[in-house]
Image: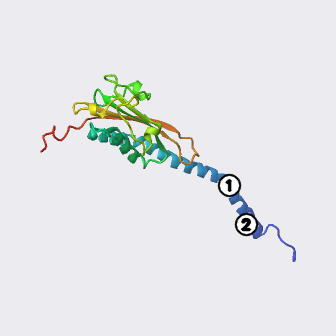
Amino acid sequence: MPGSRNIDGPTSRHRREGGAALVEVALSLPIFIALLGLLIDGSFYLFARETMGALVGEGVRAASIARDEPTADRQAVQAMFERSAGMPGVTVERVVVYEASELGAPPSAHCRDGRPSDRPGERCNVYSGSDLDRNSELRSCVEAAPWCPGDRSADQLIGVFVRVRYEPLTGLIPLHGVFEDHVVGPIEADVEQRGAP
């Protein structure tokens, strides 16, 4: 009919299609955001788990080289802090520097649970809380850290145990975790003991 309007014309159809697209985006956006959160948090979670060995390896290497220096444990903790700086969401909760009986030997349950010991075969220093503050002075040869670096020798094995907590960055996916790892190495011999000039 001349003069009558078609309400189902092209303009009305575009509005309905545009509205349908908006509904589709509104329904799929939360799924996309959740998948993005899973990708981000999952990646950092796996990164934290996989780099634990390198983190503890840095600590045992520093403690091994520092051997009997009074700051040996501080150097081990500092090396691990420097390595963990590139690990988002990771908080170091406890570091144990211990005398190991053999390569690969874990610390005793006593030490792992956070209780220092000066008993033969279980000697360890435990650092947690404020001890792990980058600016704190770690004190060895005290009740909290009875295994004095001065008592260490090149015929011993030194181990470093670390416990870290991972908190997700986005919080969209609950990937919380606590990781523990340890590495054991020989205490480096003094330069004079190795026969160097």
Which mark lies nearer to you, 2 or 1?
1
Q: In the rendered image, which quarter contains the C terminus?
A: top left
Residue 23: quarter of image: bottom right
What label sits on residue 14 in the rendered view?
2
In this view, 138 is above or below 123? below
Dot 2 lies on which element? helix
Rendered location of residue 27, percent (x, y): 67, 52
Crowdedness of circle 1 by 10 Å Cα count: few (<14), some, many (20+)? few
The answer to whether one can see residue 106 in this image is no
**Left or right, 102 with reference to 111:** left
In this view, the residue in front, 7 or 180, is 180
Rendered location of residue 13, percent (x, y): 75, 65
Rendered location of residue 80, percent (x, y): 38, 43
**Left or right, 71 with reference to 168:** left
**Residue matched to label 1:** 26
Q: Amino acid at mark 2?
A: His
Most extreme residue toward the bottom, as rendered? 2
In this view, 34 is above or below 102? below
Q: Amino acid at mark 1?
A: Ala
Q: In the rendered image, which quarter contains the N terminus?
A: bottom right
